[in-house]
Image (spheres, rainbow, N blue to C red):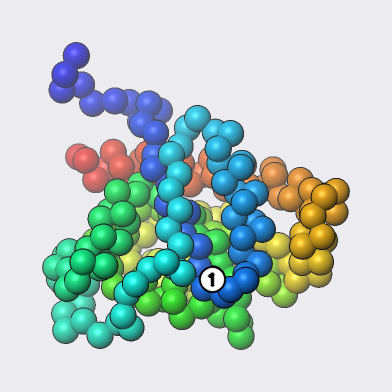
């Protein structure tokens, strides 16, 4: 019947998996492959990848803050990415850590937008010497300023685990298998927030 609003449990959230590293080659591609495989086994979400390496945004220099501009795009590239961000109900950030922080390219993307992120949830998968924890803690402050909700649980690959992941095979499988339960909990909470906030935005 037309005009019927689906119950929260019936909404399939659209999750944007944002890859924060621009290096070539980069470690991010290992967890990215695994994440896409795991996300592909779930029927309660739709996933798309937003790779900051492919984003053609200039360094942030807009005359009006995005919080006030409200989708006043200054270029085709800015509009194209803005529409993809707008289409997402939730965000999963795959975060590298450089010098106790996250990469500048990711910050540049976040600085260009506001309404596209507002009232949406964010979750974090970090990697680095301490699992990307310091980068994630900084990102929590940034997404709070974007009026987002950050999920408590995080997933981490630590620097000591990098050789096993790069080796592949059983060594890599052991690392990723240990992350499975935490990933499931994190995604479950991300999707709960995605459905709740989507319903609130619609209302």
> What's the residue at 59%, 55% (across, down)?
32
Q: Residue at x 16, y 84 (%)?
A: 63
- Front residue of 58/202: it is 58
Q: Going by the image, does 2 lie left or right of 128?
A: left
Number of on-image labels: 1
The residue most toward the top is 1
Residue 71 position by quadrant: bottom left
Look at the image and tell me in which quarter the C terminus lies.
Answer: top left
Front-lying residue, 24 or 124: 24
Q: Is residue 145 above or below residue 122?
A: below
User: Is residue 2 something one can see in this rendering?
Assistant: yes
Q: Position of residue 43 (x, y in %)?
A: 50, 30
Q: Which residue is mark 1?
A: 21
Residue 133, image quadrant: bottom right
Determine whether, in the image, residue 142 is placed left or right of residue 37.
left
Residue at point 51%, 77% (across, down): 103
x, y percent for residue 42? 54, 33
With respect to residue 47, does 20 lie above or below?
Answer: below
Give the image location of residue 92, x and y in percent.
49, 55
Disc 1 crowd, CA 10 A, few/some/many (<14, 14-19, 20+): many
In the figure, 10 relative to 184: above or below?
A: above
The residue at the far right in this view is: 170
Which residue is the extreme one toward the front?
24
Percent from the top left, x then y, of residue 173?
Answer: 79, 48
- Say which element carries label 1: loop
Q: Would residue 43 be found to the left or right of residue 171 on screen?
A: left
Can the viewer see residue 67 in this picture?
Answer: no
Question: Which residue is found at the position 46% from the left and 69% from the top?
Answer: 53
Report the side of 101 relative to 3 (left or right). Answer: right
The quadrant where residue 201 appears: top left
Q: Quadrant of the N terminus?
A: top left
């Amino acid at each position: 019947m037309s005009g019927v609003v689906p119950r929260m449990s019936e909404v399939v959230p659209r999750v944007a998996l944002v890859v924060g590293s621009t290096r070539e080659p980069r470690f991010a591609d290992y967890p990215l492959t695994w994440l896409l495989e795991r996300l592909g086994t779930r029927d309660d979400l739709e996933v798309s990848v937003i790779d900051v390496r492919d984003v053609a945004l200039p360094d942030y220099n807009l005359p009006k803050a995005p919080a006030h501009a409200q989708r006043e795009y200054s270029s085709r590239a800015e509009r194209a990415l803005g529409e993809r961000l707008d289409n997402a109900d939730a965000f999963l950030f795959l975060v590298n850590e450089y010098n106790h922080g996250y990469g500048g390219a990711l910050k540049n993307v976040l600085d260009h937008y506001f309404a596209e992120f507002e009232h949406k949830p964010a979750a974090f998968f970090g990697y680095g010497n301490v699992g990307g924890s310091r980068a994630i803690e900084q990102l929590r402050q940034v997404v709070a300023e974007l009026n987002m909700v950050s999920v408590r649980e995080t997933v981490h690959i630590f620097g000591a685990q990098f050789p096993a992941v790069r080796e592949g095979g059983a060594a890599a499988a052991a690392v990723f298998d240990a992350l499975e339960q935490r990933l499931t909990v994190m995604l479950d909470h991300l999707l709960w927030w995605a459905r709740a906030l989507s319903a609130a935005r619609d209302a």
